[in-house]
Image: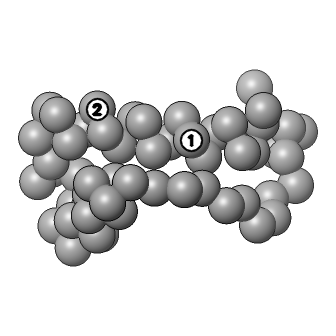
């Protein structure tokens, strides 16, 4: 399946909690390997928010 058929890209706005924003910074600085299982679940929540903006 090609996801290119589903979106053209663009600008998407997602509201993050403070914990989610902190996780994004930690992920950027230390990589996914540094995340705990709870933090990985939080990352999935962030990705779900983005997905809902890209493909409601």
Describe the element under mark 1 as helix, strand or loop: helix
Residue at position x 72%, y 60% from top? 12
Q: Which residue is mark 2?
A: 41
Count residues near mark 1 (Cα–Cα under 10 Å), then give few for <14, some for 14-19, many for 20+. some
Q: Which residue is mark 1?
A: 49
Describe the element under mark 2 as helix, strand or loop: helix
Residue 35: x %, y % from top left: 15, 48
Residue at position x 50%, y 42% from top? 47
Residue at position x 14%, y 32% from top? 37
Q: Which mark is residue 19?
A: none
Q: Nearer the viewer, residue 44 or 1?
A: 44
Q: Hey, which quadrant is residue 8 in on the image?
A: bottom right
Residue 43 drawn above or below residue 27 = above
Residue 3: x %, y % from top left: 76, 37
Residue at position x 27%, y 54% from top? 19
Q: CA distance from mark 1 to mark 2?
A: 13 Å
Would residue 39 be found to the left or right of residue 13 on screen? left
């Amino acid at each position: 399946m090609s996801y290119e058929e589903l979106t053209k890209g663009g600008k998407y706005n997602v509201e993050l909690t403070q914990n989610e924003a902190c996780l994004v910074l930690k992920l950027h600085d230390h990589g996914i390997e540094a995340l705990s299982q709870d933090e990985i679940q939080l990352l999935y929540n962030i990705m779900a928010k983005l997905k809902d903006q890209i493909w409601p």
